[in-house]
Each structure stands twice: as structure tokens, then as C-alpha cells.
Amino acid sequence: MTASNAPLCVILSLLASTLCGQQPAASSDALLQHAIALHQAGQLDDAIRAYREYLAVEPDSVQARSNLGAVLARAGRYDEAIAEYGLGLRKSPDNPALLLNLGLAYYKTGRHAEAAARFERAVSLSPQFQEQVTLLLAVCYNNLGRYKDAVALLAPLEKDKAGDAGFDYLYGTALIGDGQEAAGTAVMNRILSRGDSAEAYLLRGTLELSAHDRDRARADLEKAVALNPRLAGAHARLGELLLALGDSERARAVFAQELALDPDEFTSNLSMGVLCKQDQVYAEARRYLERALRTRPNDPGVRYQMANVDLATGNPEQARQALEALIKEAPDFAEAHASLATVYYRLNRSADGDRERAISQKLMDQRDALQPGTKPR
Amino acid sequence: MRQCWAVAALCVAGLASWVAAVGAQPEPRRPHFTDIAPKSDFAYRTDNNFTGRKYFPQTMCGGVAALDFDNDGRMDLFFTNGAKLPEMEKTDARFYNCLLRNRGDGTFEDVTARAGLLGKGLGFSFGVAAGDYDNDGYEDLFICNAGRNTLYHNNGDGTFTDVTERSGIGTKPKDVLSVAAAWFDYDNDGKLDLIVSNYTVWTPQIDKICAVNGQEYYCHPKVYPSVAHRLYHNLGNGRFEDVTDSSGFGKELGKGMGIAIADFNGDGYMDVFVANDTVRNFLFINQKDGSFKESGYEWGVAYDENGNAHSSMGADAKDYDNDGFPDLFYNNLKGQIWGLFRNIGGKYMSYVSGMSRVSRLSEHSSGWSNGFVDYNNDGWKDLYSSNGDIDNMGEISRQPDTMFENVDGKEFRDVSAQLGPDFSHAGFQRGSAFVDLNNDGFMDLVVTSLDEKPRILMNSADNGNHWLLVNTIGRRSNRDGVGAALKLTTTSGRTLYNHVTTSDGFMSSSDKRVHFGLGTEKAIESLEIRWPSGIVQTLKKLRADQILTVTEPGR
């Protein structure tokens, strides 16, 4: 999407003016100027070498560290860039430009939780960055399932940006994810009014999927994928639908397509992890689930699945620790209490098992009371 | 030079095909099934009175029992049927239950009226359980209904008498739906007790209408309350006591479907698994003092491995990997995962649906009745399921049954399409029973389907494998021998396990004789029977391919 890429080039500029680190000695200053010149000339490998030479002499230079990060990022070497930004932040922890660039590097590697945290901090330190990061932050929020935060961020912009395809898609995704179906439908119709669009079909398919209207959802999601096979999230939603329809074979293929486009896509990693767990191919399940956790660290659903993998692979003690930690943070997670009960029984801790069993039962009963079966099976 | 390369390539290709041919396992010869129901003149069709309005219990109709009611050595068949709705009455013959006597020539005679089993006053019938509760040598029938449940005593002269009132077994409130039942002797006192699986509270008057976009569908079970299953203790002299509360069954509220009976922990006392629809499954472990402890969590069978309760339907407990411990199999609806659980040393169950490939094989089917059955007599119990969607709203609502063939006790493969067109019939299949109708040692199948005649599927029995059927007669134990655990060792040292029960699947009751497929082995080194009384009986040097009647020693 244009929304996710547009502000990137704005941020990846040299930061000499914003940094107020130590002044290097005159002899090494020439080395730095040479590195900057190479950087500006787009000679990335030479610039990286020059910055490193300079940093060997002046290891505490935040400016050089930041620039090295920037040139590494420009060369697509994001993990190295993250390391350099990290070193820079050790010296200058509240440097908003460094935080911003670190956020961008995380963003580019699909680590949206880390990216969002850096963007938020950068904006809190330097509100003028707000405009530059809003859309990126919204993408992060949507990917993290923080739809309410995305809506809060985007709603004030609707007046000015409505009609911009990138904005509408981002906003529509946030609204639908947040359960604001009517407002989401209005945004989706705005996209549709401009003609056939994969984004609009994806949004409508997502809405239909959440309404259990599976036939229509299937038609729209397949249309979205056909119109734009590279549209982020389209294969993932189609995979979800196929799973709901009981076609796990095709769902696997579709999730694999999504992951080929974006190896960090959350739903696809989680679903593939669950499917592999279902097939009792536990090493592979763990690999997918770890990838999902990288995208959404601490996601209770993924952690729950990981704990169940522990239990299934004969590690009840590890499962116990994971589940105990999980229910501390998510005390209403009925399934986690149920699994923990089984783990306790397996560990011959009957009293604890009985307690967890009672809690899980109570939570499930409460949930059933709130959601009487109102849809066909 | 190019020619040389071409020759080399041909050689390599030839080698590859030779390797493939050597490495490939030859497909075993498989029996197939042929429906012989059309040869017989009987009126029974499974009639749930679907006229457009979707009453909640209409999805469940057509229980089957296989029993030799007249002790002529040939297994007969009994079917339950629906009722006119909302009247809840069997207003005319199309709703009557049905007893078919096996003539022994591949045809069946409808003897329902003569036997007194039409069930005119029963309302909408669901499950049926066959068992000799009074140890008089004749199989009796218990029928689950919306309305009052019914116990029929077999008079031994081809007729039955409704003894519900005087038996004390009619304690169920009329608005509770009982859908399945199983006979077993939970206290090993030599008399068959009865467990009844209850579904919910329902009458036509409180039936809810559920619809989406103006189209009515069968309501989700969550719109109705859960209820307790009921346990009846056989006091002797034809009397039963409702011990639901004192036994611990009353504490757990579920939406009961199929029941599986087995001694899961090997302590000599029968335990009870109840598959529940949309709520967690129950495993009642016998405490040997007249009470049970619901232990689904401990054993890991309450939910699937993701903590989800599914629409569990049929259930069966048998030893599919021949390790001496009964395993568990339940099915459920399309898109869910059928549960296959391996019993780990009588301590807990390991969820093996994925590893055994059952999850992938089953995901397109909505299963109802089910069970372990060694259909090809290779000594490995296979997985059968009668299938069909709950509703008639989709293109693939009508579904064929499935047979997943057991591969060395480790995994399963779908052989359904190879079992003949009659097996592959697509419908809204519901009840099913495993029974050897022609005493040829190969298990036949009887399957009901909504708004259709039942299929009586005869096994072609033509793969040359050998077998043993054991008909147990208890003396200190209950006369049927229900609960007796059998261990068979062949001359090659192969060990097979099974136990006596008529309860499997959903709403149904199977051949009580214990079936062993023996593969290519023609002789049995030993057969050990551990009777519910505790007596252990060992028979040596038996020939295969016989129906062996074994009477419990001593009294």
C-alpha cells in the first residue's frame, strides 16, 4: 500500500542537524565528512565502510552511528541498522530522530510492535513527527490488532484524507477490525464508488466473514485475490474463510501465499502454527508460532498455542509456567484455565487442577450466556 | 555422444521405475458393501416429519439396534422413528418403530406389530439400547424419546411388553430429550445397569425458531439448556433405582449424544464416556463404590487440544492400536476435528487426531454415528462414520459415509470410495450398527438416513482373512457378559484386545458378540476372558473362523 511506504524517504535523511553529540577531533572530522559525502552520493558500501572507520576512532559519535544505521537501512540491511540505532540510543536514549529511524527499521522488518513503540516514543518527545508517522503507526496498529488505536489515530484525518485510496483502506480496515461495521461499510463504499478495487473486496469480504456470511465472503475475497494477488492480508483472510469452511488443504496453500508476500503476517503464521500443531508436526508449529509472536509479542492466543505445544510434546512443567504467566495477564482466558487444569492433573496437583477447572467452567458458562447460539452451525 | 546420454537417461528412468515398483506396497484386497435392504418387504423409512418447519430434534432420528431377539442365532434389527410434529405423536404407520427378523436368506421380515413394538404411544423416538437386563437369556430394549422413555421386556416368545412403569426407569421429566442409552454393569453385581444420555429440555411448545435472511435453520444447541445424564441401578426383579444424584452423574450438566463404555483405567470397573454437543465431553471414571468422578479434564478428553468444545456426536471406545488399553473416538461436524484419543497406559488420553491423519481425513464430513470396526478382518480396528450435514442448507449437505482404514495401529487412510456404491450413498445419515448378519465373520453395517429406507450393507467378506466371533454368556456376571475384557493371542504371538459392549456410535446398539479379525492367521493360541465378576478364564488352541460361545465358569 502507498500508505505504508510514503513517509519512509522523508525520515531516512541524514541527521547531522538534529543530533547534538560529541564533536569529533579535527582529524577524524574529515573521515566523517567523507562518509557523509559517500552516503549522499549513494555509494552505500563505501559509506558504510567509511562510517565504520570513523566509529572505530570515535565510537561514541551518535551522529555517525545514526548515519551508519540509515545507510545500512537504505542498503536493506535492517538488522544491522537496528543494531547501530540501538547503540546510538544507548548514548542518547531520548533522541527522537534515532527513535524514529529505529522504528522505521523495525517497521521494514515487520516487527510492528517494536516499531509502534519507537514511533509512539518519538512523537511524544517530538510532536512534529506526528504527521510523518501517523499512517505508519496506523499500519502497525492494524497489524497488531490494535484497531481501536488505529481508529483514534485516523478518525481526525478523515475530513482531509477521505477519498485517498491508501487512507480509506487503512481506515476501513481499522473500523471493521474494531467492530464498527456501519462506519467501515461507509468507507468501503467510498472505495467501491471509484470502481472495481481489490481493497474494497477485501474489506467487504472481511465484513462478511465476521458476519458468518461465508458464501458472499468467499466470492469477495477470491475476487480481491484475483484483482491484486499482492494485496497484503487478502490471502490471509481467504485462508481464514477456508478454514471456517473446513478446507484446511487449500487454506494452507493460501496462507503460504500470504507468507511469501509477507513472512511476518500474523494470521497466516498463527493459523499455520495451529494447523501444524493439529498435524502434530510440532517443530514446524513452533516455528510459525514464534514468527507470529515476533509480530505480536505477548499475544495471548499465540502463547496459549505454544503452551499446548509444550504439553503435547511432553513438557507439562514448561506448559504450566507458560499458562500460569498467561492467565495472570489474561485472567478471563477460559481455554487457558482449562489447559492449565489438565496440566495440573498431569502433574498430580489435583487441588490446583480442580480450582482451574472450576474457573474455566465458570468463564465458559458466562461466555455462553452472553453469546447464545444465534447463527447456524 | 548425445546418443550415449540418451541411452543413459533411459537406463536411469528404467531403474527409477523398477525402484518404485519394488518400494510400493501392494494395495490389500478390500471387501466392499452391498445394500440388501431392497430385497426385503418392509415399510420403515426414517421419518422426522420434515415439512418445512424446522423443529429442534428433527436432526436426530433413526436409531438402530442389532439383537437376536428370538435366539435363533441370527441377528435381527430394530429401528426407532420420529413422530408427527408439533403433536409429538406417532399418528400413523410411517412413524412407527420397526423390528425386522432376520430370515437367514438375505431377507428380513417386518414383525413389529406381532412383537408389540410399534411404539404408538411413544412420541418422537431417538436412541435404542439392547441388553438382557433380567438375565433371562432374551435381549430387551430400552428406547430414548422426547416424552417418556420406554423399557420393553422381551417375553421370549417373539413379543415384548412395555414395563417402564413397574421398572422404575420412567423417572425422566417428559420435557427432557433422551437421545442415547447404554447397558453396563457398573457395580459388577451381575445385573445390567443403564446410563441415559440426555440432550436438553424441549417440547414443541417451547421450540424456538431460528432464521437468517428469512431462511429458517436448525437452532444452535446453545439456545437450549444443558441437563444431567441419568444413571439407573438395576435392583433385580425388574426394578431400577434412579441413582443419578448419588452416583455423581447429576452434578454435571451436558448436551449428551453418544455413549462409550469401557474400562479405561484397567481397574475392572466400567467407565462411561459421554460425547456432548457444543459443551465439553464427560468421562465418568468409576470409583468402585457406586459413584463416578467426572474426569474429562484429567484425561484430556473434555475439549480438543485448543480448549474448544465441538459438536461431539457419536462415540466409541475400543483398542485400535492393540496395546491393551481402550482408546476413544468421537466424531463431530464439518470443519471441526474428529477426536481420536490414544489411551496412555490407563492414565490419560493423548490426542492423536493429527498424527493419525484423522483430522485431515475428517474435515469435510459431518459425522453422527461412528465406531471402531475391523471391517476387513486384518486385526486392526478401522474407523467408521455415518455422515450428513445437520441442516439442508448447502450443496454438500448430503454426504457419504466414511471408512478410515487402520494402518498398523498408527495412522488411517480413507478407503471409503473403494467400498462400493452402496457404501458411498450420500444422504443425511444418522444411526448405525455393526453386526454380522450372516455369521460369516465379517462385520456388516446397518445405517439409517433421514427420509430414506435404512441401508443394510453386507460385507463381501472376500479378502480371505480369518476371524473369531465370541458370544459371552455370563453366570456370576451379567448374562450378556457386558464388560468382559478379551485378550486373544494368535499362534504367531500377535495380541488383540476387545471387550463386550453393545454401545457404540450415536442412538445405536451393535452386535454384542466380540469380533476379532485375524488377518492370515488360522489358529489362536489362547483367548483370555476377564469377566466382570473378576473370574479370569483362559481357552487354549482354538481354530479361527468360528462363532465361539463361552460360558463363564462357576456361579
Image (cartoon, coloured by chain):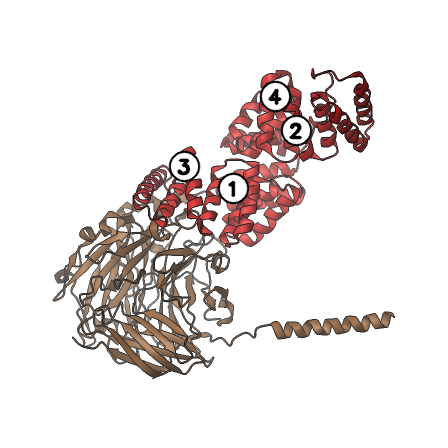
Chain colours: A red, B brown
Alpha-carbon span between mark 1 and mark 4: 44 Å
Alpha-carbon span between mark 4 and mark 3: 33 Å
Quick one: SS at disc 2? helix
- Tell which subunit mark 2 falls on: A
Q: Position of residue B287 (x, y in %)?
A: 23, 56
Q: Amino acid at mark 1?
A: Leu
- CB contact under 8 Å: marks 3 and 1: no
Q: Earlier in the sequence, mark 1 or mark 2?
A: 2
Q: Which residue is mark 3?
A: A327
Q: Quadrant of residue A291?
A: top right
Looking at the image, which is closer to me, A337 or A175?
A: A337
The answer to whether marks 1 and 2 sit on the same chain is yes
Quick one: SS at disc 4? loop
Q: Which residue is mark 4?
A: A93
- Tell which subunit mark 4 falls on: A
Q: Which residue is mark 2?
A: A104
Q: Is residue B108 visible?
A: no
The answer to whether marks 1 and 4 sit on the same chain is yes
Q: Is residue A139 above or below residue B493?
A: above
Q: Which residue is mark 1?
A: A209
Q: Which mark is residue B185?
A: none
